[in-house]
Image: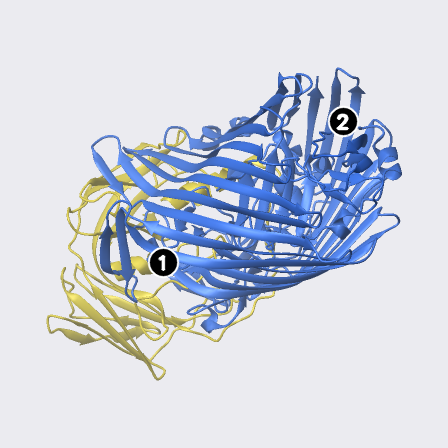
Amino acid sequence: MIGATVTVKELPGTGSSANTYGYYSITLPAGRYQISAQFMGYAPQVQTVNLNQSQKFDFQLTEQVNELKEVVVSSQRKNENITKLQMGVQKLDTKDLKNIPVIFGEKDVLKTIQLLPGIKSAGEGSSGFNVRGGATDQNLILLDEATVYNASHLMGFFSVFNSDAIKDISVYKGNEPAEYGGRLSSVLDVKMNDGNDKKLSVSGGIGLISSRVTLEGPIVKDKGSFIISARRTYADLFTKLSNDSTINSARLYFYDFNVKANYRINDQNRIFLSGYFGRDVLGLSNTYGLHWGNSTATVRLNHLVSDRLFSNTSLIFSNYNYKININNGIEMNIISRIQDYSLKQDFQLYSGNNSTLRFGINSTLHKIIPGIITAISDVDLKSMTNKHAWENAIYISHQYGLSKKLSVEYGARFTTFSILGPGKFYTYDSTSDPRDTMTYKTGQFMKTYFNIEPRASFNYILNDASSLKASYARNVQNLHLLSNSTSGSPTDLWIPSSNNVKPEISDQVSLGYYRNFADNQYEFFTEVYYKKLQNQIDYKTGAELNFNENVESQILFGKGRAYGLEMFLKKKYGRFNGWISYTLSRTERKFDGINNGNYYPARQDKTHDISIVGIYELNKSWTFSSTWVYNTGNAVTFPTAKYQIDGTTMMYYSSRNANRMPAYHRLDFGATWLVKKTKDFESSWTFSIYNAYGRDNAYMIRFRNNEQDPTKTEAIQTTLFKFVPSFSYNFKF
Amino acid sequence: MKHHIIQLAMALLLIFSFSSCEKVVDLNLDTSSPSIVIQGNVFDHDGPYMIQISKTVAFTESNIFPAVSKAKVTISDNLGNSERLTETSPGTYMTSTLKGIPGATYTLTVVAEGSTYTAVSTMPEPVDIDRIYIRKSDVGSNREVAFDFQDPAGIDNYYRVIEYVNGSLKTGINVGNDKLYQGKIITYSLGSSSIKKDSVLQSGDRVRIQFECIDKGVYEYFRTTKGNGDQSTSPTNPTSNISNGALGYFSACTVRQDSIIYH
C-alpha cells in the first residue's frame, strides 16, 4: 500500500511511510510500543510490540467503505502534504476517479489528471497532456516501470489505462526524485492493481461504447494474487448505422489486457509479474488498415537485504508498433516500431531515523525501426536505417532531516546515451541535403552524450498545518517524438538523439507554500516555477516526417522558457468534497527562422486554466458529481492576408502563434447509483453528461471560400462534443 | 497520401461523435501589408504562356486581388532565348515567340514597383497518360475516374494533376512523387469519396485531367501548400521558388491531357 503511514503511539512525530512496494522501516530504542498503520479509506491497525531486536511487522489493512468518514475524522491528522519533502507531485487513487464524470463514461486517469494545476489537456477529449508548458512527448509515462510510448487509444479519445486495473498514479511535474529520468516535463507513474489475495472476484462494466471485465483472486491465499483485466470498445457499431457506404465499411475499435501476479516467496522476497497488451484497429473495407498498440512486461523482485536495506530488481520490456496496410491496386505494408529492454536495480537504505539513502542503476537498450515498406505482390523492400541506442543511468540521493522543521533531499542522476551501429549516419548542408554519410558496424559507438542531472528539494515546516518547500531539478531527454499534427497521430515517430539531434535539457526551480485548514479537512498549496529549456524541436516548412531517411534534416532546434503560478484547494473529507485548481502560466519558444528569431508562445500556452470538481454524496445509493473547466485558447496562427493560386484561395501567415483560439469552457455532470451492495454482490449504474450547457468549443478553425459565394472567405469552427450522454452498468461479485 | 488517410480517420471520428458540428465564426484578424503574388508556367506545347502578377488582400475582403501593372517581365532559357512579355490585360503578361522544350532551364525575372524577383525552373521529360477509365472505388460502392501512367525508372519524378469538370476548374492542389513507386505503373484515382461533397460526379459529366511533370522546386511549392487553410499543423507559407519574398510559383512543366464522360 503505497504511502500508508506507520506511526508509533509512544513517540509522536516518529514514523515512516510505506515505499512504492509497501515496505517501511523505523528505528527505535528498545522498549514496548504500539505501532499503528493507516491509509485513506482503510481501517487503521494497531500492533503492540516488545522491541528488543530487529523485527518485521506486516499490516493487512482492510477496506472500509461505509465507515470511511468516521474513520477519517477520528483517525489522526492527515498532514502528509505538509510534512512530505517532495513538491510538485500529485497522487490520485483510482477511488478518486470513480465519481468524476468523463466523456463516454469511461473512467480515465489521463483525463482526470488534466483537472490538476499545471497539467493541461492537449485538446478536446484528448488523453495527451502538457505539464508546465512542456510538449506532450516530454512526459515519461510508466506502467509498472515500463515506458508507454503512446498512451492513447482511438486517436486520443481514450487512454491506454484501464482504470479497473490501476491501483494509483503519481504525477511529478518536473522535479521528480533522482530515480526517475528521461523526459523534461513530468513523470506519470502508474501502478497496476495487485489483485485480491483473499478471495476470487469478478467485476466489470457494460457501457455505451465499451465494456470491460476483471478477474482477480489469490494464487495462494495471503501469499500471492493475480488480476486479469480486459476491455473492448465497439465504436464502429455506430458507423455501421450510417447509410454512407464509405463510413459503414469502416472498422474502428480497440481492446486491451492487463495482467499482474505477485507472490510472496518468503518474508524477504516477493516477486511481481505484470504485463499490458493493447491494440487499436482502424480500417476502411479492404483498402486501408492501421493497427497500432503498446505491449509491456515487467518482472520485479523485492528483496529485503537486511532490516534497513531494501532492494528492487526489475527486468522491463516495452514495445510500441504500428502497421499500415494499403491496397489500391498495389498492396503495401508499412511497419514501424520502438522497443526497449531494461534492467533496473534500486536500493533504499534506511541509515538512521532521519536519513534515507536511495541509489541505483538503470540500463536500457532502445531499438527503433522507423519504417519498413513491403509490397506483397513482388519482392520489393524499402526500409530506413534502424536506430540503436543504449541509455545508462546511475543515481544517488540522500534524504535527511536536519532538524524537526527542516529536511532536505539532494542527489544527482548521471546519464549516458550512446548511439550505436549498425547504421548510416548523415550530416546535412544548409539546404537539408545529405553532405556526408558515415556507416557504422554493429555495436560500434557512434556518439555518446554524458549528462549530470542534479536534483534538490527542501522542506521547512512552519507548523503542523503549513510548510514552505523549494526545489531544483535538471532533466535530460534523449528520445524525441516527431509529430507535425497538433492532435498527434499513431504514426508519429520517436527518434533518438544523434550527431544532428542533441539531448533536450531543462532546468526548473520551484517554490511552494503548503497550508491545511480545519484540522486538515482542507488542503491548499501554491507553487511557482521557472523552467529553462534547451535543444527544443520544431520543424521546417512542410517537413516530411514519415518515411524520410533524412528526417533529421527536417528539424529546427531552439530554446524555450516556461513559468507560472499554480494554486490548489481541496476539501478532502465529508459528504461534499472536491477541489479548485488554477494555473496562470506562460510558455515560449525561440527558433532561428521562425518569427524572425523572437520568442513566441508555444501552441500549448494557455494563460489561465481553471478546474472545479465537486462530489456530493446524497445518501448511500446516490452520489452526484460535477466538473467545470475553463482555459484560455491555444496560441495559434491565423491568416493576415489571402491570395489566389490557380483558382485556389491561399492564406498568408505572418507571426507564429500570434492569435488565440476562443476560450474553452465546459460543465459535466455525473451520477452514480449504487443499486445493490451485499457481501457477495454489488451493482451500480453511472450516468454522465459531457458539456452539459452545450458550449461550442472550438476543436479546430479552418479558413476557406464560402461555398455559396466563392468571392468570399470564411472561418469555420468545428465543435466536437456537445451534450454527450453516457451510461454504464457496473457489477462485482 | 497517408495524411489523407489520417484525415479520413478523423472525419470518421467526427461522424461517429454524433454531436460534432461546424459553424462560421467571426474572428478579429490582423492584416499584414500587401505582398506581391506571381504565378505562371512554361509548357512543352506552343505558347503563348502567361505570367500573372497580383497582390494579397485582407482576409475579410472579397476575393478580388489587385493586379500589378507596368511590370517588366522577362523569361529566358539556357539555350540563348529570351523574351520580354507584354501586358495584355492588367496584371496578365504573355509571351509571343518562346517555346518550351523538355530539359531546358527557364529563368523568370519580374521588376515591379521597384523590386526585382527571379525564379528558375527546369522542364522535366514528359510522361504520357496510358489510359483513363472509370472503375469501382476501393471504398464503398462509388465509381471513380482513374488513369494510369508509366513512371520512368531511375529518376525522381514529380507530378501534378489538375481536374476540370464540364470545363470548370476544380479547386484544390494535387501533387505527388514516385518515392514509393519508382519505375512502376502508377494509378491515380480522382477519388469520388462521398466524404468530399464537392467531388460527387453526376452521370454524363465530362471530366478532363491535365497531367503535369513538374520539377522538384515546384513540387516543393505545391507540397508545402498542403494544410494551408487549416490549423492541423502550425501553418506557414509555402516554400516559393521565387526570390525576394514574392508569393506564388513559376513552373516549366510538360503537360498531357485526356478526358472521359462519367457514367
Chain whose colour in the figure is blue: A
What amino acid is labelled 1 in the image? Gln
Report which residue position mark 1 lands on. A554
Q: Can you give x and y, in whole percent of width and height, for residue B128 in the image?
A: 17, 47
Report which residue position mark 2 lands on. A62
Q: Which of A343 and B203 is in front in this view?
A: A343
Give the mark, 2 or 1, whose residue is nearer the N terminus: 2
Res. A123 visible in picture: no
Chain whose colour in the figure is yellow: B
- Outermost left residue: B79
Q: Place residue B72 in its image quadrant.
A: bottom left
Res. A9 visible in picture: yes
Q: What crowding class fits label 2: few (fewer than 14 Cα within 10 Å), some (14-19), or many (20 or more)?
A: few
Say if B243 sits above or below A363 in the image.
Answer: below
Quadrant where the C terminus of chain A is found in the figure:
top right
Q: Place residue A265 in its image quadrant.
A: top right
Question: Which type of secondary structure does the marked residue at label 2 adopt?
Answer: loop
Question: Which type of secondary structure does the marked residue at label 1 adopt?
Answer: helix
- Could you tell me which chain the residue with mark 1 belongs to? A
